Image (tube, grey):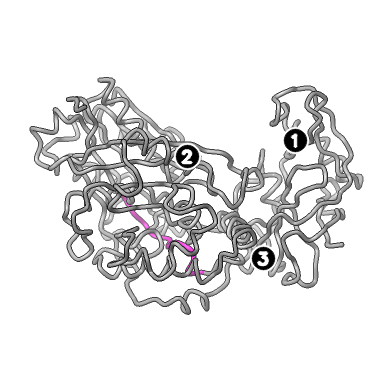
Amino acid sequence: MKNGRDPVIVGLADAPIEDGKFVTKASVLGHAALVAKAAVEEAGLTLDDVDGLLTAGMWGVPGPGQLATVTLGEYLNIMPTYVDGTNIGGSAFEAHVAHAAMALREGYCEVALIVYSSDQKSLRSRNLGGRPSVLSMQHETPYGMPTPVGGYAMAAQRHMHEYGTTSENLAEIAVATRKWAQLNPAATRRDPLTVDDVLSSTMISEPLHLLDCCLVTDGAGAIVMTTAERARDLKTKPVAVKGYGEAHTHWAIGEMPDLARLLPAQKAGETAMKMAGVSHSDIDVVEVYDSFTVTVLLTLEALGFCKIGEGGDFVSGQRTAPGGAFPMNTNGGGLSALHPGMYGMFLLIEASRQLRGVCGDRQVAGAETALVHGTGGTLSSGATVILQKD
Amino acid sequence: MSTEKPLPVIDHDSAPYWEAAHEGRLDIPLCGDCGKHHFYPRAICPHCHSDNLKFDTVSGRGEVHTFTIARRPAGPAFADDVPYVVALIELEEGPRMMSRIQTDDPESVRIGAKVEVTFVKATDEITFPYFRMT
């Protein structure tokens, strides 16, 4: 049943990057502000209309980034009356959509702005050096655990052991994703890629090769949400938020309940699909977090697109590539388009653009329903959003 | 960037565990109510949430639950160690813990391999429980 306060997405923006770096000269907060402004203006709104502010990031810690919504609100010179700084890793923005949807339904805000920005590539701030050796990490960091890739490698190793999944299966995902990137002028890596290229790339943390890993880039993105009623007067065609779910299980990889099974995705996916009243066959396009190839495999299984253990078969034969039966990560993903640390924002932007039908060469014909799933931490958290063309 | 290896920042939950390791014992919490061990040490049992816990010396035997061979180090501090094997060990008593597998042949490590604890002194205060295949 339709309701005037049903949550919809009405504004989208992302910052241009070249060779993985911001083109515009601005601070990390400057890029957040520029995409925020672009996203609200696209909808025919202004930043002064924003009363809900949601953000998560890795900038300014220790320091002003510890109170990220407060610092961003100050930079934008707005006074939000609903904020959410939920940070569950790269899936935070899928959770933000859920939280903003609830706040909009409740009448707790009218215009919600979700923002992310990172200049990690320009700053060269990303490293494998690991997490400070305190609390649970005192039992992992001192052993030289490569973070986060080592945790994903351990999950991949376990999946291979239990189900016979191969490195070739994982490479299929990287290759299919690259083919989508080749259709996206904004993607960072667009050169051809083969399964052999992936398998012969540098081994980082066995069994994961360099080309099983996402890119390290800058990036900024923003999403504006409001109610269906308010959207009627705005400039863009709204995308409806039909369902959402979230869950998390662990931070230390040693605490992951089952290394070959992604329980948060299973829980979040079930919740979101039930709320939206959709089944797997209703989904036209899938955008799932691809921090590593194995992340995708575990996610597709946990979301129920195939049985647990059958992910390797499911992605084989370039099933997820352009023209394949299962259009997935259509912008080229974190593996080939961009990955500015917390990538979940860009899954949402791409899914919304697919539903708007503005994706040019990579447009999935007739896309009406999209599933977005973010994964954060070290396979720690999952959040699913079901979006529909209004 | 520092090339000193990171050491655990010991807290009240973990102090008895690290003290025992320094004395050559693997001591982990045992719940007086549900009878299960857990790791890492906490102030309440993660299985039944009881606070009736004591440290118990365990066998130090287990098997490799999963592992990775680090070909690229976790920062410059570990550069001289590559390739090295970081593993999750499933102890006979149930809990899993992260450690290193001490081996000259990283390629020989397999999931399910039987292992036992060996203690490697890092500093005058810290000794790490590593594992080797049996």
Q: Is residue A212 shown in magenta?
A: yes
Circles 2 and 1, Cβ within 8 Å, touching? The answer is no
Q: Is residue A231 left or right of residue A322?
A: left
Q: Is residue B61 left or right of residue A324?
A: right
Q: Considering depth in this image, is B60 or A176 the residue closer to the camera?
A: A176
Residue A212 x %, y %: 49, 66
Please report whichever mark, 1 or 3, sits nearer to the chain's N-terminal start. Answer: 1
- Crowding at mark 1 (Cα within 10 Å: few <14, some 14-19, many 20+): many
Labels 2 and 1 within one chain: no
Residue B89 x %, y %: 75, 52
| Residue stretch in magenta | A210-220
For the residues marked 1 and 3, what is the alpha-carbon distance in whole angstroms? 26 Å
Residue indicated by mark 2:
A88
Provide the chain ID for the residue under circle 3.
Answer: B
Q: Is residue B53 above or below residue B5?
A: above
Provide the chain ID for the residue under circle 2.
Answer: A
Regarding mark 3 in the picture, which secondary structure is present there? strand
Residue indicated by mark 1:
B41
- Crowding at mark 3 (Cα within 10 Å: few <14, some 14-19, many 20+): many
Q: Considering depth in this image, is A2 or B6 the residue closer to the camera?
A: A2
Residue indicated by mark 3:
B69
Of the numbered discs in the image, which one, if any, rests on residue A267? Answer: none
Q: Is residue A346 shown in magenta?
A: no
- Crowding at mark 2 (Cα within 10 Å: few <14, some 14-19, many 20+): many
Provide the chain ID for the residue under circle 1.
Answer: B
Regarding mark 2 in the picture, which secondary structure is present there? loop
Q: Residue at x 83, y 25 (%)?
A: B32
Residue pushed farthest top? A107
Quarter residue B93 falls in: top right
Labels 3 and 2 within one chain: no
For the residues marked 2 and 1, what is the alpha-carbon distance in whole angstroms? 23 Å
Q: Please state which amino acid type lies under the numbered disc 3.
A: Ile
